Structures are given as structure tokens and as C-alpha cells.
């Protein structure tokens, strides 16, 4: 079969399935003991790692491996952020999950960049399941108030991007790739509006502003809750 288009019946079906799985996961996580919760979080990490290894092997075996294959997207980094948080949770990993992994994976599910992959193929299933697990991991922590982060922690995410973006940008320039969508957006997504409005020269600046606005929106509920507690 051929690929799919954004918000076509196949895409909508996946979103409904993921939403149902998310609600089910929230229920079981909420009513589990802390030991079982820890086991679930670690299991998600190992499943994500297994999925990524399986993808790399699949690309190698099918002679599809290329400069586009390494896990250099933001969601690829999410595997290791989740692993660190599952075993050694800190405010830094919590902040990265909340401000980068969650919005990145959620946006990827709403505006997938794998629409050209054959429906029913390995990469099709892998991409939806992989990103769904990223979202579920963070959501269960938020729902149970186990993700400790605050607006003053944003600098941690900014520093992470300051460290990772330059080498990824250089990699993109060297091998004509588009990891983290630094060079151009996925067609049909809101990022395309930025590219069309500001052009290639203003795309990164406008993308940076959008990220800042997104972070402020993410922490707005925290600010409202704190104000009500005063």
C-alpha cells in the first residue's frame, strides 16, 4: 500500500487508538503501586530502545540505511532522556521531557513526517507506536504529579538545545538531511506557515520564537495553580 495523508481516515484511526491507549495507561499507572509504576517507566524505556534498534537493523537489512537513519531527531534524543529519567530522575530530565519530548512527540503524531511510508509496513507501525510511547511516558508522570519542573527550569532546555542544535545543523548541511527540522519544515504542518511567511533566512528565528511561546504556554497552568494557592 501507499502512504497516507495528514488527518485522513488512517491517520484519524491511529490518533483514536493512541488516545484510547493513553487513557488506559493513565488508569493502570494511577492505580498501581510505586514499585509497579517504576517498572512500567523502565519498561517503556527498554521498549523504545528495542524499537529504535529494530528500526536501525531493518534499514540495514533492507539496504535503506542512509545519512537520514541515525536517531538525531528530537524524539530520538527522547529515548535517552526517558532512560535517564526512568533510572535517575532529576529536574533536568523532567524539564526536558516536559518542554521538548512531550510537545515534540505530540506534534509528530498530529503532523507526522512519515506519511510516505507504506501503510501497514514496519516503518509505519514503528513511527506511530514509538511516538505514542514517548507521549504516554510523560503524560502518566504529569497526571500523577510526578514530574517536578518549574518555569525557572527552562534554562535547562535552552542549554540542551544550545548544545545539540549546532552539531545537528552542521550534520544537516554536510549530508543534506533535515534532522530536528532545522532546515525546512514538514509540508502541511504549522511550521510550513513559518517557512512561507519568513522564508529560509527567517525560519530558524521564527521557530525559536514559537518554541519560547510554546514553553510559556506549557508553564501557564503552573503559574495559575500557584497563584490560586497564595
Image: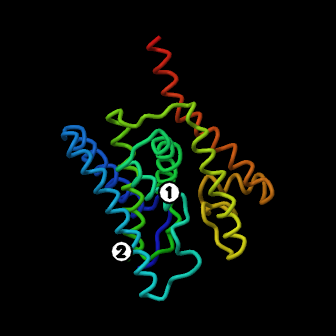
Residue 78 x %, y %: 47, 56
Q: Is residue 135 left or right of residue 32?
A: right
Q: Is residue 3 left or right of residue 28?
A: right
Structural distance between the alpha carbons of marks 2 and 1: 18 Å
Who comes first in sequence, dot 2 or dot 1? 1
Residue 111 x %, y %: 52, 57
Frontmost residue, 72 versus 177: 72
Q: Quadrant of the N terminus?
A: bottom left
Q: Are marks 2 and 1 in contact (CB under 8 Å)?
A: no
Residue pictured at 50% horizontal, 65% vertical: 5
Q: How is the structure coloured here? A: rainbow
Rendered image quadrant of residue 128: bottom left
Graded by Cα atoms within 10 Å as few (under 14), some (14 to 19) or many (20 or more), the crowding at tag 2 reads few
Residue 35 x %, y %: 21, 44
Rendered image quadrant of residue 89: top left
Frontmost residue, 136 versus 192: 136
**Mark 1 = which residue?**
108
Q: Is residue 80 left or right of residue 161?
A: left
- Disc number at residue 120? 2
Graded by Cα atoms within 10 Å as few (under 14), some (14 to 19) or many (20 or more), the crowding at tag 1 reads some
Residue pictured at 45% horizontal, 58% vertical: 80
- Disc number at residue 137? none
The residue lying furthest to the right in this view is: 201
Of badges 2 and 1, nearer the viewer stands 1
Frontmost residue, 199 versus 154: 154
Residue pictured at 39% horizontal, 64% vertical: 10
Q: Is residue 91 left or right of residue 193?
A: left
Secondary structure at numbered mark 1: helix
Secondary structure at numbered mark 2: loop
Residue pictured at 78% horizontal, 53% vertical: 202
Residue 208 x %, y %: 69, 47
The residue lying furthest to the top in this view is: 230
Amino acid at each position: 500500500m501507499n502512504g497516507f495523508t495528514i488527518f485522513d481516515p488512517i491517520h484519524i484511526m491511529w490518533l483514536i487508538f493512541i488516545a484510547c491507549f493513553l487513557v488506559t495507561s493513565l488508569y493502570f499507572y494511577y492505580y498501581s503501586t510505586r514499585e509497579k509504576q517504576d517498572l512500567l517507566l523502565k519498561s517503556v524505556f527498554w521498549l523504545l530502545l528495542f524499537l529504535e534498534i529494530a528500526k536501525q537493523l531493518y534499514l540495514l537489512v533492507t539496504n535503506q540505511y542512509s545519512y537520514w537513519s541515525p536517531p538525531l531527531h528530537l524524539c530520538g534524543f527522547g529515548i535517552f532522556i526517558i532512560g535517564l529519567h526512568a533510572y535517575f530522575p532529576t529536574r533536568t530530565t523532567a524539564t526536558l521531557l516536559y518542554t521538548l519530548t512531550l510537545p515534540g512527540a505530540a506534534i509528530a503524531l498530529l503532523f507526522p513526517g512519515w506519511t510516505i511510508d507504506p501503510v501497514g509496513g514496519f516503518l509505519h507501525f514503528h513511527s506511530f507506536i514509538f511516538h505514542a510511547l514517548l507521549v504516554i511516558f510523560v503524560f502518566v508522570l504529569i497526571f500523577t504529579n510526578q514530574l517536578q519542573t518549574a518555569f525557572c527550569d527552562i534554562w535547562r532546555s535552552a542549554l540542551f538545545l544550545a548544545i545539540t542544535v549546532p552539531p545537528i545543523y552542521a550534520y544537516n548541511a554536510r549530508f543534506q538531511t533535515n534532522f530536528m527540522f532545522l532546515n525546512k519544515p514538514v509540508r502541511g504542518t504549522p511550521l510550513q506557515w513559518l517557512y512561507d511567511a519568513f522564508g529560509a533566512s527567517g525560519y530558524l528565528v521564527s521557530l525559536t520564537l514559537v518554541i519560547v511561546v510554546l514553553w510559556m504556554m506549557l508553564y501557564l497552568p503552573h503559574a495559575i495553580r500557584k497563584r490560586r494557592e497564595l
